[in-house]
Image (cartoon, rainbow, N blue to C red):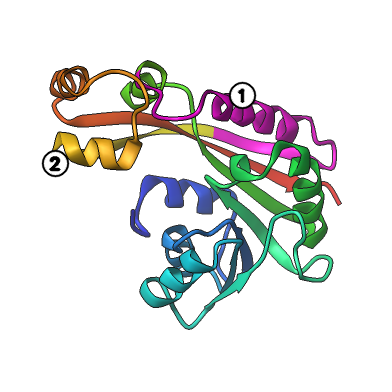
Amino acid sequence: MSGSTPFLRRLQSIVPLKDKAVLDIGCGEGLWTKELAHHCRRVVAIDPDRTALRTALKNNGADNISYAHGRAERIAFPNASFDAVVFAKSFHHVPPKSMPRALDEALRVTKPKGCLVFIELGWAGSFYEAELQFGCDHDDIRTIKAYAYQLMLSERRMKEIAEWTEVLSYQYRSLQEFIDNEQPRRGTRPEWKRFLARHRQRLTAEERINVFRKRR
Protein backbone atom coordinates (compact mmCIF):
# COMPACT_ATOMS: atom_id res chain seq x y z
CA MET A 1 0.00 0.00 0.00
CA SER A 2 1.43 3.38 -0.93
CA GLY A 3 0.34 6.92 -1.53
CA SER A 4 0.09 6.29 -5.27
CA THR A 5 -2.40 3.42 -5.02
CA PRO A 6 -5.51 3.65 -7.20
CA PHE A 7 -7.59 3.65 -4.03
CA LEU A 8 -6.01 6.82 -2.63
CA ARG A 9 -6.02 8.55 -6.00
CA ARG A 10 -9.72 7.85 -6.41
CA LEU A 11 -10.53 8.79 -2.81
CA GLN A 12 -8.76 12.12 -3.18
CA SER A 13 -10.67 12.86 -6.36
CA ILE A 14 -13.85 12.57 -4.28
CA VAL A 15 -12.61 13.80 -0.90
CA PRO A 16 -9.69 16.23 -1.26
CA LEU A 17 -7.51 15.58 1.78
CA LYS A 18 -4.94 18.32 1.49
CA ASP A 19 -5.00 20.66 4.49
CA LYS A 20 -7.66 18.49 6.15
CA ALA A 21 -7.88 16.99 9.63
CA VAL A 22 -8.74 13.28 9.55
CA LEU A 23 -9.75 10.85 12.30
CA ASP A 24 -8.73 7.21 11.77
CA ILE A 25 -10.99 5.05 13.97
CA GLY A 26 -9.69 1.59 14.81
CA CYS A 27 -6.24 2.31 13.41
CA GLY A 28 -4.62 -0.92 14.62
CA GLU A 29 -0.89 -0.78 13.95
CA GLY A 30 -1.21 2.38 11.89
CA LEU A 31 -0.64 1.14 8.32
CA TRP A 32 -3.57 3.11 6.90
CA THR A 33 -2.80 6.00 9.24
CA LYS A 34 0.65 6.49 7.79
CA GLU A 35 -0.69 6.41 4.23
CA LEU A 36 -3.38 8.96 5.02
CA ALA A 37 -0.82 11.21 6.69
CA HIS A 38 1.00 11.66 3.39
CA HIS A 39 -2.02 13.53 2.06
CA CYS A 40 -3.54 15.29 5.08
CA ARG A 41 -2.62 18.21 7.28
CA ARG A 42 -3.21 16.15 10.41
CA VAL A 43 -4.31 12.61 11.27
CA VAL A 44 -5.54 11.54 14.69
CA ALA A 45 -5.70 7.76 15.10
CA ILE A 46 -7.49 5.91 17.89
CA ASP A 47 -7.70 2.25 18.83
CA PRO A 48 -8.78 0.31 21.94
CA ASP A 49 -5.70 -1.96 21.74
CA ARG A 50 -2.79 -0.34 23.56
CA THR A 51 -0.31 -2.91 22.22
CA ALA A 52 -1.29 -2.10 18.64
CA LEU A 53 -0.94 1.62 19.40
CA ARG A 54 2.60 1.12 20.71
CA THR A 55 3.48 -0.71 17.49
CA ALA A 56 1.88 2.06 15.44
CA LEU A 57 3.81 4.74 17.27
CA LYS A 58 7.07 2.84 16.79
CA ASN A 59 6.67 1.80 13.14
CA ASN A 60 4.19 4.20 11.59
CA GLY A 61 4.78 7.56 13.17
CA ALA A 62 5.04 10.96 11.48
CA ASP A 63 5.06 14.57 12.59
CA ASN A 64 1.42 15.05 11.58
CA ILE A 65 0.12 11.87 13.25
CA SER A 66 -1.07 11.58 16.84
CA TYR A 67 -2.17 8.28 18.35
CA ALA A 68 -4.58 7.95 21.26
CA HIS A 69 -6.29 5.18 23.15
CA GLY A 70 -10.00 5.25 22.46
CA ARG A 71 -13.10 3.44 21.28
CA ALA A 72 -15.45 4.18 18.40
CA GLU A 73 -18.41 4.28 20.78
CA ARG A 74 -16.90 7.04 22.91
CA ILE A 75 -14.71 9.47 20.99
CA ALA A 76 -12.94 11.98 23.21
CA PHE A 77 -13.04 14.95 20.83
CA PRO A 78 -15.41 17.93 20.55
CA ASN A 79 -18.19 18.21 18.00
CA ALA A 80 -17.14 18.95 14.42
CA SER A 81 -13.43 18.36 15.06
CA PHE A 82 -12.57 16.63 11.77
CA ASP A 83 -13.04 17.15 8.06
CA ALA A 84 -13.16 13.40 7.46
CA VAL A 85 -13.52 10.22 9.51
CA VAL A 86 -12.17 6.88 8.28
CA PHE A 87 -13.04 3.34 9.36
CA ALA A 88 -10.38 1.23 7.60
CA LYS A 89 -11.64 -2.34 8.02
CA SER A 90 -12.59 -1.53 11.60
CA PHE A 91 -16.32 -0.78 11.69
CA HIS A 92 -17.29 -4.47 11.72
CA HIS A 93 -15.12 -4.96 14.83
CA VAL A 94 -17.43 -2.72 16.85
CA PRO A 95 -19.92 -4.90 18.78
CA PRO A 96 -23.21 -4.87 16.83
CA LYS A 97 -25.18 -3.42 19.73
CA SER A 98 -22.68 -0.54 19.86
CA MET A 99 -22.54 0.18 16.11
CA PRO A 100 -25.37 2.77 16.15
CA ARG A 101 -23.57 4.60 18.97
CA ALA A 102 -20.26 4.44 17.07
CA LEU A 103 -21.94 5.90 14.01
CA ASP A 104 -23.48 8.64 16.18
CA GLU A 105 -20.03 9.50 17.53
CA ALA A 106 -18.41 9.51 14.09
CA LEU A 107 -21.06 11.88 12.80
CA ARG A 108 -20.78 14.08 15.90
CA VAL A 109 -17.05 14.72 15.44
CA THR A 110 -17.35 15.24 11.65
CA LYS A 111 -17.74 18.81 10.45
CA PRO A 112 -20.89 19.78 8.54
CA LYS A 113 -20.51 18.62 4.93
CA GLY A 114 -17.51 16.54 6.02
CA CYS A 115 -17.01 12.96 4.84
CA LEU A 116 -17.08 9.51 6.37
CA VAL A 117 -15.18 6.70 4.66
CA PHE A 118 -15.78 2.98 5.32
CA ILE A 119 -13.38 0.36 3.95
CA GLU A 120 -14.34 -3.31 4.37
CA LEU A 121 -13.64 -6.64 2.73
CA GLY A 122 -16.53 -7.72 0.52
CA TRP A 123 -18.01 -11.08 -0.41
CA ALA A 124 -16.15 -12.10 -3.55
CA GLY A 125 -12.82 -13.72 -4.39
CA SER A 126 -10.84 -16.81 -3.46
CA PHE A 127 -10.04 -15.38 -0.01
CA TYR A 128 -13.76 -15.27 0.75
CA GLU A 129 -14.05 -18.80 -0.66
CA ALA A 130 -11.42 -19.93 1.85
CA GLU A 131 -13.37 -18.27 4.65
CA LEU A 132 -16.49 -20.21 3.70
CA GLN A 133 -14.83 -23.55 3.01
CA PHE A 134 -12.35 -23.67 5.88
CA GLY A 135 -13.93 -21.43 8.49
CA CYS A 136 -11.10 -18.88 8.31
CA ASP A 137 -13.49 -16.32 9.70
CA HIS A 138 -16.26 -16.80 12.21
CA ASP A 139 -19.66 -17.28 10.59
CA ASP A 140 -21.16 -14.45 12.64
CA ILE A 141 -18.54 -12.02 11.28
CA ARG A 142 -20.17 -12.22 7.86
CA THR A 143 -23.53 -11.46 9.45
CA ILE A 144 -22.00 -8.55 11.35
CA LYS A 145 -20.42 -7.14 8.17
CA ALA A 146 -23.79 -7.31 6.41
CA TYR A 147 -25.47 -5.54 9.34
CA ALA A 148 -22.78 -2.84 9.38
CA TYR A 149 -23.26 -2.26 5.66
CA GLN A 150 -27.03 -1.90 5.98
CA LEU A 151 -26.64 0.38 8.99
CA MET A 152 -24.44 2.86 7.16
CA LEU A 153 -26.67 2.85 4.08
CA SER A 154 -29.80 3.52 6.14
CA GLU A 155 -28.31 6.42 8.12
CA ARG A 156 -30.24 9.55 7.05
CA ARG A 157 -27.79 12.05 8.52
CA MET A 158 -25.32 11.25 5.77
CA LYS A 159 -25.59 10.76 2.03
CA GLU A 160 -23.59 8.22 0.04
CA ILE A 161 -21.55 9.96 -2.64
CA ALA A 162 -19.43 7.04 -3.85
CA GLU A 163 -19.11 3.26 -3.64
CA TRP A 164 -16.65 1.06 -5.47
CA THR A 165 -14.73 -2.17 -5.11
CA GLU A 166 -11.11 -3.07 -5.65
CA VAL A 167 -9.32 -6.41 -5.75
CA LEU A 168 -6.66 -7.22 -3.18
CA SER A 169 -4.27 -10.16 -3.33
CA TYR A 170 -2.63 -12.11 -0.52
CA GLN A 171 0.50 -14.08 -1.39
CA TYR A 172 1.42 -16.96 0.92
CA ARG A 173 5.00 -18.16 0.92
CA SER A 174 4.04 -21.45 2.55
CA LEU A 175 1.12 -23.48 3.83
CA GLN A 176 2.20 -22.65 7.37
CA GLU A 177 1.97 -18.93 6.66
CA PHE A 178 -1.61 -19.46 5.49
CA ILE A 179 -2.43 -21.43 8.65
CA ASP A 180 -0.78 -18.89 10.96
CA ASN A 181 -2.45 -15.88 9.35
CA GLU A 182 -5.93 -17.20 8.59
CA GLN A 183 -6.36 -19.87 11.29
CA PRO A 184 -8.65 -22.28 9.38
CA ARG A 185 -11.05 -24.13 11.66
CA ARG A 186 -12.30 -26.72 9.18
CA GLY A 187 -10.62 -29.11 6.77
CA THR A 188 -7.20 -30.77 6.82
CA ARG A 189 -3.67 -29.76 5.91
CA PRO A 190 -3.81 -31.66 2.58
CA GLU A 191 -7.07 -29.87 1.71
CA TRP A 192 -5.62 -26.46 2.57
CA LYS A 193 -2.49 -27.27 0.56
CA ARG A 194 -4.49 -28.30 -2.51
CA PHE A 195 -6.61 -25.16 -2.25
CA LEU A 196 -3.54 -22.93 -2.16
CA ALA A 197 -1.90 -24.83 -5.00
CA ARG A 198 -5.00 -24.40 -7.15
CA HIS A 199 -4.72 -20.65 -6.64
CA ARG A 200 -0.91 -20.61 -6.99
CA GLN A 201 -0.45 -19.53 -3.38
CA ARG A 202 -2.25 -16.24 -4.06
CA LEU A 203 -5.78 -15.49 -2.83
CA THR A 204 -7.81 -12.52 -3.96
CA ALA A 205 -10.40 -10.55 -2.03
CA GLU A 206 -12.89 -7.85 -2.85
CA GLU A 207 -12.48 -4.62 -0.92
CA ARG A 208 -15.50 -2.32 -0.77
CA ILE A 209 -15.19 1.42 -0.20
CA ASN A 210 -18.18 3.56 0.77
CA VAL A 211 -17.90 7.35 1.00
CA PHE A 212 -20.62 9.46 2.65
CA ARG A 213 -21.08 13.18 3.13
CA LYS A 214 -22.55 14.46 6.36
CA ARG A 215 -25.72 16.33 5.48
CA ARG A 216 -25.28 19.12 8.01
Which structural element holds mark 1? helix
The residue drawn where x is 61% and y is 61% is 48
Amino acid marked by disc 2: Arg
The residue drawn where x is 81% and y is 47% is 101
- The answer to if 144 sits in the magenta stretch is yes
Circle 1 residue? 143
- Which contiguous range is marked in magenta? 134-163
Residue 173 circle label: 2
Front residue of 128/204: it is 128
Q: CA distance from mark 2 to mark 1?
A: 31 Å
The residue drawn where x is 45% and y is 75% is 57
The residue drawn where x is 13% and y is 38% is 174
Front residue of 74/176: it is 176
Which structural element holds mark 2? loop
Report crowding for label 1: few under 14, some 14 to 19, many 20 or more residues within 10 A (C-alpha).
few
Counting from the top left corner in percent of width and height, residue 21 is at 64, 69
